[in-house]
Image (tube, rainbow, N blue to C red):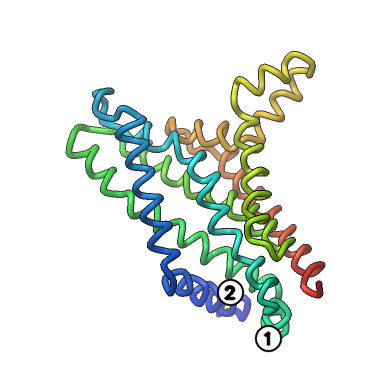
Amino acid sequence: MPDIVRNTLTIAKREFKAYFSTPLAAVFLTIFVALTGAFAFHMGNFFERGQADLNPFFQYHPWLYLLLVPAVAMRLWAEERKAGTIELLMTLPISPWEAILGKFLAAWAFIGVALVLTFPMWITVNVLGRPDNGVIFASYIGSFLMAGAFLAIGSAVSAVTRNQVIAFIVSATLCFLLVMSGLELVLNVFRLWMPGFVVSAISSLSFLTHFDRITKGVLDLSSIVFYASLIIFALFANRILVELKKAD
């Protein structure tokens, strides 16, 4: 196994275990499962709709991630900087990339655990009816990719400040803008004074545009490339910011 893979996995395992060494994991997982269930069954009128699908469940994921994912991401680097351990981390026999990827993968896996805990809802709709399981599977994949994009942005922002609250607010704001850019209400405002191709470009940068497409069962290459590109770009920014800020 190449050293970069071994070192990255070592860091990822250490960081992943750290989540469960504090009440943070239980609190986050409980809140996520409770809110997704409440939104799907209560606000989404699951039983009143009379349809065995998880559309009400997935439609709230972007809005939940706006609060919950930045809460996970804010500690990734801000905590290291506040404690003064970032210099120690950078002096270990690992590269900055291994540290960045390890932390990111651990946090992404943690969010993946939260999604796995919602699988009983998938079982429930199969008991109640005959849903399109292909659409549900694609929606889970899309939700996981979208969470990764939120997380990568939050990780980069976390590298800028020692204050976790500031990291949370800034990353949530950036993600909010990327979500809102796909709403028709926002796009209609831009249509009043911008050419159509610019409005289309703004819409293509939205989490909602790509996630809505995936939740309809269209797991196309453009949506996958969008989320993957955003993750890669944010991690590159994370790398630059860690190098710039590690001596502060």
Disc ID at residue 231: none
Q: Nearer the viewer, residue 46 or 209?
A: 46
Q: Which residue is mark 2?
A: 8
Name which residue lies at 24% across and 28% down.
47
Q: Quadrant of residue 204?
A: top right
Residue 134 is left or right of residue 196, and the answer is left
Is residue 5 depicted above or below 128 in this figure? below
Q: How many numbered marks, from 0 up?
A: 2
Q: Which residue is mark 1?
A: 93
Residue 138 is left or right of residue 232, and the answer is left
Count neighbours of disc 2 (C-alpha within 10 A) and say few if under 14, some if 14 to 19, many if 20 or more. Answer: many
Counting from the top left corner in percent of width and height, residue 136 is at 36, 39
Name which residue lies at 66% across and 76% down.
83
Q: Quadrant of residue 174?
A: top right
Report the amino acid beneath label 1. Pro
Name which residue lies at 34% across and 47% down.
34
* Disc with the residue nearer the chain's start (2 vs 1): 2
